[in-house]
Image (tube, rainbow, N blue to C red):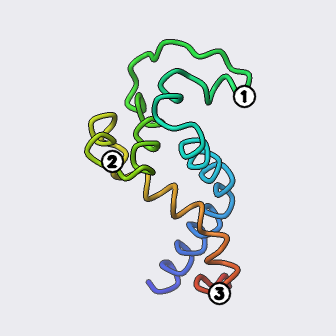
């Protein structure tokens, strides 16, 4: 049982390290552009992507929700997309996982 937990911790830790650049980029874009610019598609235009109308998936509004969460406006973030409660802390944790690894707070066998 202990070895299974240790293996799961190792896999999750390295998954966090592997995904940390993507998570940090998403959080950085939310902080850089802000909710209004994200709503207008500026974050996508900066990447050379033409913004399209949202098809209405479960992720609709999550970029704006991240931007509102970074600004501390959690009630507005929740109105944009309730998944922000789960996704935002996960993205923050993934962004910080290399720091945890380098400081020894998470030890890889």
Lateral position of residue 20 relative to residue 39, left or right: right
Label 3 vs label 1, nearer the camera:
1
> What is the crowding at mark 2: few (fewer than 14 residues within 10 Å), some, or many (at least 20)?
few
Lateral position of residue 79 relative to residue 67, left or right: left
Q: Name the outermost residue toward the right.
A: 48
Lateral position of residue 107 relative to residue 37, left or right: right
Q: Secondary structure at mark 2?
A: loop
Front residue of 96/72: it is 72
Q: Label 2 to label 3, Cα distance in Å?
A: 33 Å
> What is the crowding at mark 3: few (fewer than 14 residues within 10 Å), some, or many (at least 20)?
few
> What is the crowding at mark 1: few (fewer than 14 residues within 10 Å), some, or many (at least 20)?
few
Residue under the point 35% across and 43% down? 83
**Which residue position is annotated with label 1?**
47
Residue 23 lies, in percent from the top left, at 60, 51
Front residue of 16/4: it is 16
Label 2 vs label 3, nearer the camera:
2
**Which residue position is annotated with label 2?**
73
Residue 25 lies, in percent from the top left, at 65, 47
Dot placed on the residue nearer the N-terminal end, 2 or 3: 2
Q: Secondary structure at mark 3?
A: loop
**Which residue position is annotated with label 3?**
104
Q: Secondary structure at mark 1?
A: loop
Residue 68 lies, in percent from the top left, at 40, 43
């Amino acid at each position: 049982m202990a070895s299974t937990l240790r293996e799961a911790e190792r896999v999750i830790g390295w998954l966090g390290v592997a995904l940390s650049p993507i998570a940090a980029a998403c959080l950085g874009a939310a902080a850089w552009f802000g909710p209004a610019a994200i709503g207008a598609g500026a974050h996508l235009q900066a990447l050379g992507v033409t913004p399209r109308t949202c098809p209405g998936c479960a992720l609709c509004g999550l970029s704006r929700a991240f931007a509102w969460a970074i600004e501390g406006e959690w009630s507005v973030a929740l109105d944009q997309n309730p998944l922000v409660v789960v996704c935002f802390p996960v993205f923050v944790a993934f962004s910080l996982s290399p720091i945890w690894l380098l400081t020894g707070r998470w030890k890889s066998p």
